[in-house]
Amino acid sequence: MSNIPSDLKYTKSHEWIRLEGDVATIGITDFAQTELGDVVWVELPEVGRALQAGETFGSVESVKTVSDLYAPVAGQVIDVNPALSSQSELINSDPYEKGYMLKVRVDSPSAVASLLDADAYKSVIS
């Protein structure tokens, strides 16, 4: 079974989000990286870009497929993980820490509450 940390929120499209104040760290779940296989490249937005909830913000390419990435919440990109440009495999080896994708200053932190908790996400992938 996939690693699904209970302190995170999730989307049905397999993104995770960790909210600290009004800053959300976002990446893809352990389940998603397992399904994708070895990640070979990731396309992420520029710092400063405004995202709408549900909007495509980039893509991840693996040996099997290319998948779009969707913003779990609205906000402005304040950081893109610089390590992923040369070490996209971090998404596979450490999806919740070193393999995070970006940080967003969230427009409405309360919007995170409407996302899936760990138990709800488990039922999505089971």
Image: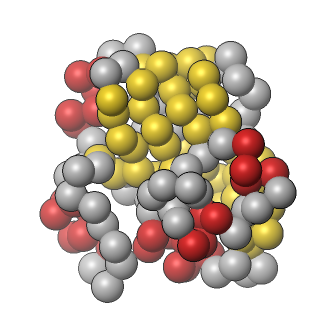
Q: Quadrant of residue 35?
A: bottom right
Quadrant in which the N terminus is drawn? bottom left
Task: Identify whether 2 is placed above or below 81.
Answer: below
Task: Identify whether 77 is placed above or below 37.
Answer: above
Residue found 22% across the figure and 36% down from its top = 114
Q: Position of residue 98 (x, y in %)?
A: 56, 55
Residue found 24% across the figure and 70% down from its top = 122
Quadrant in which the C terminus is drawn? bottom left
Q: Quadrant of residue 19?
A: top left
- Residue 92 showing in the rendered view: yes
In this orientation, which residue lies closer to the viewer: 66 or 29?
Answer: 29
Task: Identify whether 13 is placed above or below 47.
Answer: below
In this orientation, which residue lies closer to the viewer: 65 or 23?
Answer: 23
Residue found 52% across the figure and 66% down from its top = 94
Residue found 73% across the figure and 43% down from its top = 82
Position of 105 compared to 41: left or right? left
Q: Position of residue 11 (x, y in %)?
A: 37, 50
Task: Identify whether 45 is placed above or below 98.
Answer: above
Q: Residue furthest bottom?
A: 1
